[in-house]
Amino acid sequence: MKLFYNLKQLKYFISLFLLAVVQLSYAQSSPRSVIDFNKNWKFFLGNDSTAIKADYDDAKWRALNLPHDWSIESDFSKEYPATNQGGALPGGIGWYRKTFVVPASSENKNISIEFDGVYRNSEVWINGHYLGKRPNGYISFQYDITEYIKQAPVKNIIVVKVDNSQQPNSRWYSGSGIYRNVKLIATGANHINDGSLFITTPFISKDSAIVNVSGVIETVSAHYLAHKARVSVLSAEGKTIFAQTYNAGSVNEIGGINYSIKIPHPVLWSTTSPYLYKLKLELLSTRNELLDNVTTSFGIRFFNFDAQKGFFINGKPLKIKGVCMHHDLGALGAAFNKAAAKRQLKILKEMGCNAIRTAHNPPAAEFLDLCDEMGFLVMDEAFDMWQKRKNRYDYHLDFKEWYKRDIEAMVLRDRNHPSVFMWSIGNEIREQFDSTGIALTKELTAIVKALDTTRPVTNALTENFPDKNFIYRSGVLDVLGFNYKLYDYKDLPSRFPGQKILASETVSALATRGVYDQPSDSMRIWPPDSKQPFVKGNPDMTVSAYDHAYAYWGATHEQALQAVNKHDFIAGCFVWSGFDFLGEPVPYPWPARSSYYGIIDLAGFPKDVYYMYQSKWITKPVLHIFPHWNWQVGQVVDVWAYYNNADEVELFLNGRSLGIRKKENDELHVVWRVPFEPGVLKAVSRKNGKIVLTRQIKTAGKPAKIELVADRKAIKADGKDLSFVAVRVLDKNGNLVPDADNLIKFSVSGAGIIAGTDNGYQADTLSLKSHNRKCWKGMALVIIQSSGKKGNITLRADSTGLLPVFLSLKTSD
């Protein structure tokens, strides 16, 4: 029997067979997978270099999930070398190990591990092979571990050493450990290069927008002579509004793609309407088999700075109403948590804030996702120092070797976020005072511009005279950011003709929530070049919450806001700071351990000045009066009111009118000086004689009960989600007791754990992980985290002399 009639037929059947083999190999593979790599790590606080060995016994190590910050777990102490400027918490050396088996979906793939942030000096090993070191604690980085991976069922060991032992290395609390998310990324041999995808919008009109998509396709397989790329754009509602397939790349080369897409009638992203599209890029074989895919959100928007008129977005003027934010999340420390970050941004959004400066380092990637979704502009900042140090062991030691890789990593990771509207290459850099600043500024700006020409580059400067400022003299900055010195604002256009100007850092006012030293107006410092560090210190390490105390380089909130609003050429401001943060407790020494600068305290409770910003930054009616109404009979008390959308405010005490006040000129508050008598203090705002709002404060009695108020009663059962529960000590009539300092003991049962407690007091030295917390000025906070299981959670709060109180929460998918 003849199997083949001729050689031609034989070749035909052989080709069919080979084609079937190739098709089978691709059919059995799946496209890109991104695996959450945060669970089931082991941790040891201490130094043991033998931990890199595969057969090391880590059975006695602590089991935990990432993100993790070991420093926040300690009590505060003045003995720690970070000092109270670094948060009065320990550094040290820690080791992490994770044993894992490569998932079936990732076998025979290119595999990399991605760390979003490790503080600091991280070193990584896989199966005993050294992958590298990353000194910078705020930079995302990735290692290709393909050649060292063992396929299932053989186990793999990833080991990370974190060295934060050299202290001090930061001017604020840094945290310690793998404090941001970790991912395992698996792709085929032919794939889209991570970080290469870049989406820009070179043309935008009412009728259409051109969206440009560029990237790098790594084609290292010889199976195909060419690849194709399919590009799809989805609306926020999930509707496909564009889809097209293009040729892409050739065999055995790194091929670039660059496509222009026309989007009809684009919906623009803005701070008030943060509309997001999705772009899906799929790499296909010549037979349309899916080899790789990447999906990312993007926004269509345009903006510009004008030297005379400030900032414009989508053709409309917008004053930047920003705050500076450090990366810690209060009682959670540096360990990133999306729910906690979202809560902070929600509180700021309700104040009218529309911009964040990430002081003074790149944030977590998910933080930018939230800013995209919630409508915040972001100044993405790279460094707090270059070659000249601010602390003995800070980044100046690593700058020369690492600055190029670090700033490139920031731009490549963050450049597709519509929220990111400018790059800052540094904060208060000391090279601005000598000629080395010229060359470094030029080089850093060139590195950024090589990767992104769509956003301006700035630097937060402290020298306001051009001949003395060598960073300015580089001539390459697109926008000049100036910190403080508001009395120089009027002269900036003449000193820096034609330059675009932003108040990159303002205020540095000081306040402790709920503390009111009298009389308020007589205690202001002016002019702001006074070297007196603060107005009045108290033995309990507090500062009055009236807006009159500030560090010598700063000003009150009202003075700074008035100065920014007065000048159209100033594009806006970033207030120092949005929230209190751990570390930098100017003006006090130990036991103060967190800052006084925040508009909102460390626990997330607004200070009174929050409502001043709200009265200027939002359009809905605002009326806020303070202080509390528990004083000595006859004591003269300053009563302040912040308000908007009204012509006047009238104050009543026990039904008697104490007079009408109207804001004059640029005033941002009105004041009455009132001899105290117990009862009801009521304020009424009116416009054209009609009542707009009414607010009242009552004299409180003794503590009688505890109130628990959760920001969310239903959370996800993912082991990460949080409910923030405000704790209030009330009298029998339901009034907050303003001087209550009851010790509250918290316990929880069911599908949740206590992630932390706080009260906002800057000199509380008990660990923020403690389940017990004294109230501060009648309030405290307890943070409940899901345990990872579905079910009910019961929180219990106990205090001596008060009945226990319970709060029910639940977790679900």
Image: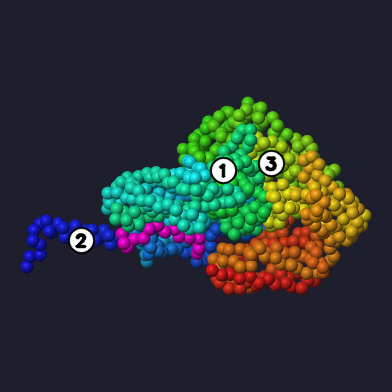
Q: Residue at x 35, y 57 (%)?
A: 290
- In the picture, the quarter occupied by the N terminus is bottom left
Q: Dot 3 lies on which element?
A: strand
- Nearer-the-camera pick, 77 or 582: 582
Q: Dot 1 lies on which element?
A: loop
Q: Which residue is mark 3?
A: 506
Give the magenta range.
26-47
Q: CA distance from mark 3 to mark 2?
A: 72 Å
Outermost residue, left direction? 1
Q: Position of residue 282 (x, y in %)?
A: 38, 53
Counting residues from the start of the chain, the first of labels 1 and 2 encountered is 2
In the shown orientation, is residue 565 left or right of residue 101? right
Tell me the number on the disc at residue 314. 1
- Nearer-the-camera pick, 297 or 217: 297
Camera sees residue 316: yes
Q: CA distance from mark 3 to mark 1?
A: 26 Å
The amino acid marked with disc number 3 is Thr
- Tag 3 near tag 2, CB within 8 Å: no
Q: Dot 2 lies on which element?
A: helix
Q: Position of residue 262 (x, y in %)?
A: 44, 46
Outermost residue, right direction? 634
Whether residue 267 appears in magenta in the rendering, the answer is no
Rendered image quadrant of residue 652: bottom right
Q: Residues within 10 Å of mark 2 (few under 14, many from 20)?
A: few
Q: Which residue is mark 2?
A: 17
